[in-house]
Image (cartoon, helix red, strand yellow):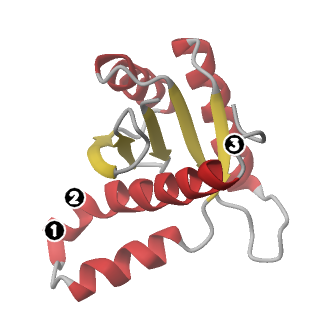
Amino acid sequence: MKIMAVDFGDSRTGLAMCDKGEILASPLATVFEKNFDKCAEKVAQLALENKAEMLVVGDPVNMNGTRGERSEKCRTFAEKLKELTNLPVEMWDERSTTVSAINIMNENNRRGKKRKEVLDQAAAAIILESFLAYRKNHPQTTS
C-alpha cells in the first residue's frame, strides 16, 4: 500500500512516501504554507497526485506521554486531510523525529538553507519508517 507521511508544521510541512510494497520510505516534498486550510489542501492534492492509499500524520506527543496544543493542532490537521481525501488517516507518535533528522543531516554535512529545505521531509520519512516497522510487526493493529 502506498502510504504518505506528514510532518505538519506552522510554516513548513514535510512529506514522505513509501513504495507499494511498504519497504522503502523516501522524502517526497516540503509544503511551504502558513495558512492551515491552504496547507491541508496542498497536502491533500499531493496525496492524490502521488496515489497515496493512506496518510500517517506525525503526532508530537510530549516526552511524558501527554498531549498538548501542538498535538491537538496535528489531530485537527489529520481530520481535515481525512475530509479532503477520503483516505484512512493514522496518527503516529513523532517524538524525537526532528532531532533524529537533524542528526542524520549533521552526519551527512547538510547545513544551512539546504538543511531547512529537506529537514521536514527527513522527519516525515523517519515517521513513516517507524510506522512501517510497527505495521510489519503488528499487521492486525493498523488500518
Q: Which residue is mark 3?
A: 139
Q: Which residue is mark 2?
A: 117
At mark 1, the secondary structure is helix
Q: Position of residue 114 (x, y in %)?
A: 14, 66
Q: Quadrant of the C terminus?
A: top right
Crowding near the residue tagged with mark 3, few <14, some 14–19, many ≥20 C-alpha atoms within 10 Å: few
Left or right, residue 78 beside residue 31: right
What distance separates the C-alpha of mark 1 from that of mark 2?
6 Å
Left or right, residue 98 beside residue 131: left
Checking the image for residue 113, the label placed there is 1
Foreground of the two, 7 or 19: 19
At mark 3, the secondary structure is loop
What distance separates the C-alpha of mark 1 from that of mark 3?
39 Å
Crowding near the residue tagged with mark 2, few <14, some 14–19, many ≥20 C-alpha atoms within 10 Å: some
Say whether marks 1 and 2 touch (CB < 8 Å): yes
Question: Hey, what amino acid is under mark 3?
Answer: Pro
Q: Position of residue 4 (x, y in %)?
A: 44, 37
Question: Hey, what amino acid is under mark 2?
Answer: Glu
Q: Is 122 placed above or below 38 here?
A: below
Q: Residue at x 66, y 37 (%)?
A: 90
Q: Position of residue 130 (x, y in %)?
A: 55, 60
At mark 2, the secondary structure is helix
Left or right, residue 97 beside residue 26: right
Checking the image for residue 101, the label placed there is none
Say whether marks 3 and 2 touch (CB < 8 Å): no
Foreground of the two, 139 or 58: 139
Q: Residue at x 34, y 61 (%)?
A: 122
Crowding near the residue tagged with mark 1, few <14, some 14–19, many ≥20 C-alpha atoms within 10 Å: few
Q: Position of residue 71 (x, y in %)?
A: 71, 52
What distance separates the C-alpha of mark 3 from that of mark 2?
34 Å
Q: Residue at x 48, y 22 (%)?
A: 53
